[in-house]
Image (cartoon, coloured by chain):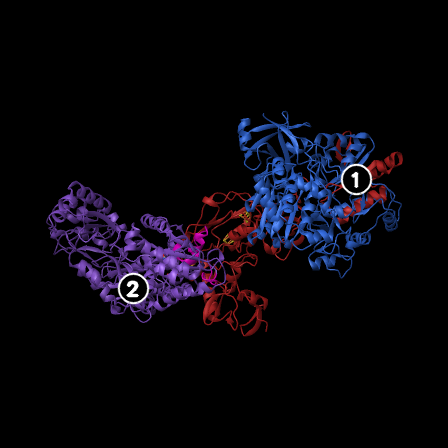
Chain colours: A blue, B purple, C red
């Protein structure tokens, strides 16, 4: 994180960093104060724009066009890092180059709505940076073409040689505190801990040996497929630990229907969430403050979680609950204390083998890979080279979002988080002071659009998509461009995800298009 | 100007304007036109405005120059204009009873006007007037014929020291800044309250000085920093800057040498601290005017962290003279270590109030009694406050001391930016110190503890003494506090803030003690310490005092001496002033 | 000696420091304590409080601003310097409410420490102190400007670190005050950075008022439960209740938090927390014992697995649980249930 300060160019795309990663935003501001150039691409005037040198207000879902446009300029003006391209990448002079050549600033400007001068300025600034870092979050991934977006970002970094060195690179910022950790730990249908593929026999055998049991050899279902499976009658039981998909998943109607179709739903949580209300069994788990363990932050730093207070009532540690259930399924897991589990993780995944609680304590966290007890941890990935040898340019073209505005649904809806609230609100909405300043849902709409609709801030409107509608007060502002509306998704009383689509998903990683849906806004 | 034309010069400095100078000038133009003066006398006649010539207590001043002889009228009001035009301009008979008296001559005789010289002589809104008196020749010489180092050399030779307060060697400051690493440098002209007459009377000299300064240190940009409220100064300077730009003295490729120098205004608020150089830089950068820590000094890291030279407007006004006449010439004026002249606003109890320029080293006696014409009403001089609010008070016993940097420093005062206030026997020294401390307290920027709270505590203690509640211990507390403030405050304001107390206490200890021990105010100023009573033997029972008293404290039957009830008396002094027989005693 | 180092003597001890090092920093490196009130290691120098003065060549100089020069001789605590320091603290106290008995920061206040050090029971310099009646109505931060010593740290942190600039100096002289524009109620990001740097009780957390002071709290270091920044957080705990969140300066987040980390912890002790397992009976969720709930789960899952195979069971884990729990969860699904149907919500 400290290296952010040493960037000379920061390109933030699809990330409301100031509100969602406030501490990372601080480092960015510090870099700006030291003379770095901050480039922001965002459909809304997010708070960090105040510190930005260049702000490109592109239409939601047009990231690829924007990025390709920038790459066009970099290519045309010879700002590429040829040595890096030759030594460490492949595929540059192929289809990729051809595609990029098509995206003149004029063409990109037409698609994105960003003046071409800005695209050129941003490309030059980024292209000339010596230590240029790119930062993105959900604004990039939550699209039907999220993977394309990520590829395009990687292309940009590769062609300018901004990868695998200090204070540069491509940095996805993780939304929830341990997203990194749950991915690392193999909570994904295709990989074991440490991103080891379940379909590779050798890997499977190693885990069978470690766990002393035969394992399945096919990829499992992804979250959205689980819900579809429930509706199709293939998935009968679902065990949800610490999540609230009713509010956080797209298309609330669809989610609820799927959960209701299950024969058996177990929800383990600290509050009776909207999801728990649908369960057959609800188990009281413990919050992070009542247990020990580790979290892994967005820069792969494994840090200690410590017990602060006792759990309320009969609430139990989640690990104990899991062990109890496992026992009842005929598979005994037994650990004397939490660090035993941690040690086993090290055996399952060499990248964490060198860590121990005491080392983490002493060294203030450790960044994986850290394979041996004397390894200092790794600050930058891909320093010497990429895991697959040479990095490949991927040819990506702009594809419009699944839903485009039409007469019936003329507005583009994008959803997101607020500084003051978190996720589905289970934690933050219980703080009175937070509720006092940010306790009400709203739809943010451009002032002129509001005027055209005959509504003012505070008036209620009905927002309708192809999936449903909610009634919600208006906040007229200059943040979104005309034709774009924004709704934070924290609020159950006006849940934004009633409107979003669960079928428009990215073909590769199945991330739903939460950032673009089309809606109609009416006075109510 | 052709020798045979008739000139009418109306003083339009701030004071002249306030006295109605604009109207006077308008009427002169009107009458000259209406009477057809030019036709009647066969000569050109153009009434014009000039800047302040310093003798502000007699404004509006008007010069009529006819056949090479100058007559100056004082206290001119609009209804006098017509007669001057008719009798003097047309008939050639000056109106003796309206002309200035001999004090006008003595006021000017002892002065040495090099900086103020053109003020009151030339039209400040005319660049041609300025050029006609060798204006911009120094800049041309410096930029086209001299290397920056040579310019700095001349300024060092001249011995010029800053006129804004600290008295730092100007050439030395430039040399350091020129040598400081960095491509981008700035020159800033600090135009304060006392500089207003300069800005109004001869704005081009400031611009020329800043231009030469910018050239010498290697800056491409200069700022004229001035309080927004000084409308007239801003207006004259803007006109001057515009003219200079038109003539190519400011802008790109000056004198065809390739030297570029831009100049712009930066406006400050009324706050006194805006004049402090580091606070001034904060202000130019758009922040609240609060002093920065030093080091780094501005010459190394000033505006936006770049090497910056900041000089007072008077300092810059000296530059064209030094370059034009040579550093040697300049160094012959003044004393061994304090060269040149210094402009002061002389005010207080002297007869001749106004703006004066004296050679460094002139004894105070000469300033007060020569230029100032002595004390009003022939009262006794008590002391002279030099150097603005945080200067020190010079007692009568030091009247023969020369005014220069060293002497003033020795007695705990400063040359400052040029304030000089004369006090007489009717002024209470404790009250004077309190007045200054209260001013400084209000004007402290509030940043550092010793100044923010120290000035408050000190003015509270002084108030306590003037209210008759002082104890001797308070004096020791104040001395201790003064030590803390002077040694630990961040900027000059706080460091010099104890001066009014320290110097007055040093020289007028008895007066302080009288307040504390005897609960008396010898000057009869501190109301809590004085009583009014009727001297029965002098009272004529006229009843004037009774009518004047706002508190109904005076009783008295006709033909009976009146009596003041001390319980009811609010000590406003109305009776004292009202009585025609000096029958009211103040003690 | 390398030319980018300078050697100076502090209190009779020689030390070499890199060019540009301040006397304060050099002294700190040597373990010599110099008191400060406005200086903060994470902020640019201010030079406002003046208590860090030291003696160089007989002159008092603020050590936070003075840069070491070759051969400098520095005395940090001569009687002369200590006397001046004492008087500066005295001046501050003369304009400070004598409120320590009820102040949130008692025992954790930098001014109180200095008052103690110099044993100032009653200031020598006495007089009026600032009285402000208006209280700031924002829900997060109690701003008691009578206790403000105008060190400027809050102004700097808000601008330099947080990039917000919600507060600044207003007025002049003794009336100088830190406040939001036009003295409106504070309306900002409520990151609480200003609370973290305030040396006195002028800025404290409103929700924590009256819940416990430094000496009666236990502290625990952990990691913030919100976003992926992974900020280190220190909780103050009184009787099993989290009452305050802070952060240490020597962590990856340098002591800074955001509104969620700083103020969003009351969910931990919320009365809404689930305290017993619930089982759906006749369409309603009713409390149940652990054994009953777990047995029911075991039975139902075994049945489903027997009838429809392990792939009829799926699990969703949480990005808010620990690594250890996530590891166990997928192990349960894979080894216990026998399916790879396990995912988490990272995508959302
Ligand atoms: C409280 C305070 C007020 C000041 N006000 C002025 C001012 O009004 N004009 C000015 O030229 N210098 C003023 N100074 C002095 C400046 O800080 C600075 O020394 C000066 O402008 C440098 O110019 P010089 O070298 O030409 O004197 C002030 C200093 C202090 C401490
Ligand atoms: S000495 Fe006074 S004016 Fe100067 S910085 Fe300190 S408080 Fe401000
Ligand atoms: S809470 Fe944060 S944003 Fe608000 S005033 Fe304090 S530092 Fe500034
Ligand atoms: S509120 Fe606290 S941090 Fe801010 S200036 Fe006052 S004492 Fe310093």
As displayed, is residue C37 above or below residue B46?
below
Residue at 12%, 55% in the rendered image = B538
Verify whether residue A23 appears in magenta. Answer: no
Name the main secondary structure of what is drawn in magenta. Answer: loop
Compared across the picture, whether C34 is left or right of A354 comes to left
Q: Are the numbered discs 1 and 2 placed on the same chain, yes or no?
A: no
Q: Position of residue B3 (x, y in %)?
A: 19, 54
In depth, the one of A462 and A33 nearer the eye is A33
Estimate how packed mark 1 is, as few (under 14), some (14 to 19) or many (20 or more) residues with alpha carbons within 10 Å: many
How far from the left and from the top, in percent, is residue A393?
Answer: 73, 46
Read off the residue under disc 2: B341
Q: Could you tell me residue C332's position as x and y percent?
A: 82, 44
> Which residue shows up at 10% across the image and 48% down it?
B91
Judged from the image, the secondary structure of the residue bearing numbered disc 2 is strand
Can residue A27 be seen from the camera position used here?
yes
- What residue is shown with label 1? C315
Image quadrant of ligand 1 equals: bottom left
**Number of callouts:** 2
Going 71% across and 58% down the picture, which residue do you hit?
A361
Residue A64 percent across, percent down from the top left:
67, 40
Q: Is residue B293 magenta?
A: yes
Q: Give the magenta part as a residue range.
A: B274-300
Letter of the chain that mark 2 sits on in the rendering: B
Q: Which residue is nearer to you in this view: B278 or B92?
A: B92
User: Depth check: C191 or B324 in front?
Assistant: B324
């Amino acid at each position: 994180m400290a290296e952010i300060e040493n960037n000379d160019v920061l390109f933030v795309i699809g990330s409301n960093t100031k509100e969602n990663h406030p501490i990372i935003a601080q480092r960015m501001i510090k870099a700006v104060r030291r003379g770095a150039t901050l480039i922001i691409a965002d459909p809304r005037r997010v708070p960090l724009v105040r510190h930005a040198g260049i702000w490109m207000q592109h239409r939601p879902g047009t990231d690829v066009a924007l990025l390709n446009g920038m790459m066009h300029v970099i290519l045309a003006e010879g700002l590429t890092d040829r040595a890096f391209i030759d030594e460490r990448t492949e595929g540059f002079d192929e289809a990729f180059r051809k595609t990029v050549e098509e995206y003149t600033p004029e063409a990109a400007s037409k698609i994105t709505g960003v003046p071409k001068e800005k695209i050129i300025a941003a490309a030059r600034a980024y292209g000339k940076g010596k230590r240029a870092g790119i930062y993105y979050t959900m604004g990039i991934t939550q699209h039907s073409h999220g993977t394309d977006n990520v590829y395009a970002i990687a292309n940009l970094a590769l062609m300018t040689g901004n990868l695998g060195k200090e204070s540069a690179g491509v940095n996805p910022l993780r939304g929830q505190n341990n997203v990194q950790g749950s991915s690392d730990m193999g909570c994904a249908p295709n990989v074991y801990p440490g991103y080891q593929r379940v379909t590779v026999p050798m890997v499977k055998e190693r885990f069978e040996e470690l766990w002393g049991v035969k394992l399945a050899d096919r990829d499992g279902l992804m979250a959205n497929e689980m819900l579809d499976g429930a509706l199709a009658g293939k998935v009968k039981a679902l065990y949800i630990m610490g999540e609230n998909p009713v509010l956080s998943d797209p298309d609330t109607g669809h989610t609820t229907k799927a959960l209701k179709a299950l024969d058996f739903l177990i929800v383990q949580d600290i509050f009776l969430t909207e999801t728990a209300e649908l369960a057959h069994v609800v188990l009281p788990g413990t919050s992070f403050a009542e247990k020990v363990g580790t979290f892994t932050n967005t820069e792969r730093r494994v840090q200690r979680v410590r017990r602060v207070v006792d759990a309320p009532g009969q609430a139990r540690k989640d690990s104990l609950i899991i062990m109890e259930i496992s026992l009842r399924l005929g598979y005994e897991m037994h650990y004397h204390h939490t660090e035993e589990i941690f040690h086993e993780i090290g055996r399952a995944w060499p990248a964490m083998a060198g860590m121990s609680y005491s080392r983490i304590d002493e060294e203030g966290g450790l960044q994986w890979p850290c394979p041996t007890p004397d390894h200092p941890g790794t600050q930058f990935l891909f320093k010497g080279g990429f895991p697959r040898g040479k990095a490949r340019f991927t040819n990506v073209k702009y594809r419009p979002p699944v839903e485009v505005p039409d007469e019936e649904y003329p507005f583009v809806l994008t959803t997101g988080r607020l500084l003051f609230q978190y996720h589905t609100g289970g934690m933050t909405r219980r703080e009175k002071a937070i509720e006092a300043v940010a306790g009400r849902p709203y739809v943010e709409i451009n002032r002129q659009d509001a005027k055209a609709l005959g509504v003012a801030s505070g008036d209620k409107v009905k927002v309708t998509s192809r999936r449903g509608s909610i009634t919600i007060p208006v906040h007229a502002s200059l943040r979104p461009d005309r034709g774009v509306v924004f709704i934070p998704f924290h609020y159950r009383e006006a849940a934004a995800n009633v409107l979003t689509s669960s079928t428009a998903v990215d073909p590769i990683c199945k991330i739903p298009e939460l950032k673009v849906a089309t809606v109609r806004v009416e006075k109510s | 100007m052709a020798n045979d034309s008739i000139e009418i010069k109306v003083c339009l400095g701030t004071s002249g304007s306030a006295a109605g100078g604009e109207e006077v000038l308008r009427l002169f133009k009107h009458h000259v036109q209406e009477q057809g003066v030019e036709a009647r006398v066969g000569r050109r006649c153009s009434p014009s405005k000039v800047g302040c010539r310093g003798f502000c207590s007699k404004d509006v001043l008007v010069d009529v120059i006819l056949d090479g002889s100058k007559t100056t009228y004082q206290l001119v009001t609009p209804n006098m204009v017509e007669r001057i035009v008719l009798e003097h301009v047309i008939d050639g008979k000056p109106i003796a009873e309206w002309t200035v008296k001999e004090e006008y001559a003595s006021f000017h005789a002892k002065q040495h006007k090099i900086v103020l010289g053109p003020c009151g002589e030339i039209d400040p809104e005319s660049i041609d007037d300025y050029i006609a008196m060798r204006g911009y020749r120094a800049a041309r010489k410096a930029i086209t014929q001299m290397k920056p180092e040579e310019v700095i050399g001349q300024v060092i030779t001249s011995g010029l020291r800053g006129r804004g307060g600290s008295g730092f060697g100007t050439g030395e400051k430039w040399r350091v800044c020129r040598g400081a690493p960095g491509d981008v440098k700035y020159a800033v002209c600090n135009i304060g309250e006392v500089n207003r007459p300069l800005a109004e009377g001869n704005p081009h000299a400031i611009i020329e000085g800043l231009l030469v300064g910018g050239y010498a240190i290697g800056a491409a940009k200069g700022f004229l920093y001035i309080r927004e409220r000084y409308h007239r100064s801003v207006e004259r300077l803007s006109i001057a800057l515009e003219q200079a730009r038109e003539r190519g003295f400011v802008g790109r490729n000056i004198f065809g040498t390739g030297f570029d120098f831009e100049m712009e205004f930066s406006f400050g608020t009324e706050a006194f601290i805006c004049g402090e150089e580091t606070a001034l830089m904060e202000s130019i950068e758009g922040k609240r005017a609060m002093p920065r820590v030093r080091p780094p000094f501005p010459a190394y890291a000033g505006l936006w962290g770049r090497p910056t030279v900041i000089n007072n407007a008077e300092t810059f006004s000296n530059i064209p003279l030094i370059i034009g006449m040579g550093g040697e010439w300049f160094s012959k004026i003044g004393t061994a270590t304090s060269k040149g002249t210094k402009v002061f606003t002389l005010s207080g109890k002297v007869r001749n109030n106004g703006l004066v320029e004296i050679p460094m080293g002139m004894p105070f006696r000469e300033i007060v009694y020569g230029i100032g014409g002595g004390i009003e009403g022939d009262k006794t001089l008590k002391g002279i406050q030099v150097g603005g609010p945080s200067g020190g008070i010079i007692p009568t016993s030091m009247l023969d001391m020369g005014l220069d940097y060293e002497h003033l420093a020795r007695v705990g005062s400063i040359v400052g930016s040029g304030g000089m206030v004369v006090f007489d026997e009717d002024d209470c020294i404790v009250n004077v110190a309190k007045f200054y401390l209260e001013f400084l307290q209000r004007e402290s920027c509030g940043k550092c503890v010793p100044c923010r709270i120290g000035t408050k505590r000190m003015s509270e203690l002084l108030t306590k003494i003037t209210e008759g509640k002082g104890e001797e211990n308070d004096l020791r507390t104040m001395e201790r506090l003064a030590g803390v403030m002077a040694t630990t405050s961040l900027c000059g304001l706080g460091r010099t803030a104890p001066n009014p107390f320290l110097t007055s206490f040093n020289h007028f200890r008895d007066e302080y003690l009288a307040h504390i021990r005897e609960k008396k105010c010898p000057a009869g100023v501190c109301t809590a310490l004085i009583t009014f009573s009727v001297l029965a033997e002098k009272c004529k029972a006229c009843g004037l005092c009774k009518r004047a008293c706002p508190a109904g404290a005076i009783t008295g039957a006709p033909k009976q001496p009146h009596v003041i009830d001390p319980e009811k008396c609010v000590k406003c002094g109305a009776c004292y002033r009202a009585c025609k027989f000096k029958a009211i005693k103040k003690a | 000696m390398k030319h980018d180092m300078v050697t100076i003597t502090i209190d009779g001890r020689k030390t070499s420091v890199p060019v540009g090092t301040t006397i304060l920093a050099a002294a700190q490196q040597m373990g010599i304590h110099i008191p400060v009130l406005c200086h903060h290691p994470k902020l640019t120098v201010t030079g406002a409080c003046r208590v860090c003065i030291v003696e160089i060549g007989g002159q008092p100089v603020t050590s936070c601003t003075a840069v070491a020069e070759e051969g400098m001789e520095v005395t940090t605590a001569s009687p002369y310097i200590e006397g001046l320091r004492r008087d500066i603290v005295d001046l501050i106290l003369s304009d400070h409410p004598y409120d320590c008995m009820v102040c949130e920061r008692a025992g954790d206040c930098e001014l109180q420490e200095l008052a103690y050090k110099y044993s100032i029971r009653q200031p020598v310099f006495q007089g009026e102190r600032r009285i402000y009646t208006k209280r700031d109505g924002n829900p997060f931060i109690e701003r008691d400007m009578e206790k403000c010593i105008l060190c400027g740290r809050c102004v700097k942190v808000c601008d330099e670190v947080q990039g917000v600039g919600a507060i600044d100096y207003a007025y002049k002289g003794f009336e100088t005050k830190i406040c939001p524009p036009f003295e409106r109620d504070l309306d900002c990001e409520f990151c609480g950075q200003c609370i973290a740097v305030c040396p006195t009780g002028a800025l404290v957390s409103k929700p924590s008022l009256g819940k416990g002071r430094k000496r009666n709290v236990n502290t625990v270091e952990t990691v913030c439960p919100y976003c992926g920044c992974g900020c280190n957080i220190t909780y103050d705990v009184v009787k099993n209740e989290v009452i305050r969140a802070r952060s240490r300066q020597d962590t990856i987040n340098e002591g800074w938090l955001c509104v969620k980390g700083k103020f969003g912890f009351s969910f931990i002790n919320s009365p809404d927390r689930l305290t017993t397992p619930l089982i759906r009976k006749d369409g309603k969720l009713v409390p149940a014992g652990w054994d009953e709930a777990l047995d029911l789960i075991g039975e139902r899952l075994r049945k489903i697995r027997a009838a429809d195979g392990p792939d009829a069971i799926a699990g969703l884990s949480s990005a808010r649980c620990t690594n250890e729990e996530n590891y166990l969860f997928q192990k349960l699904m894979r080894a216990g249930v026998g399916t790879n149907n396990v995912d988490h919500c990272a995508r959302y």
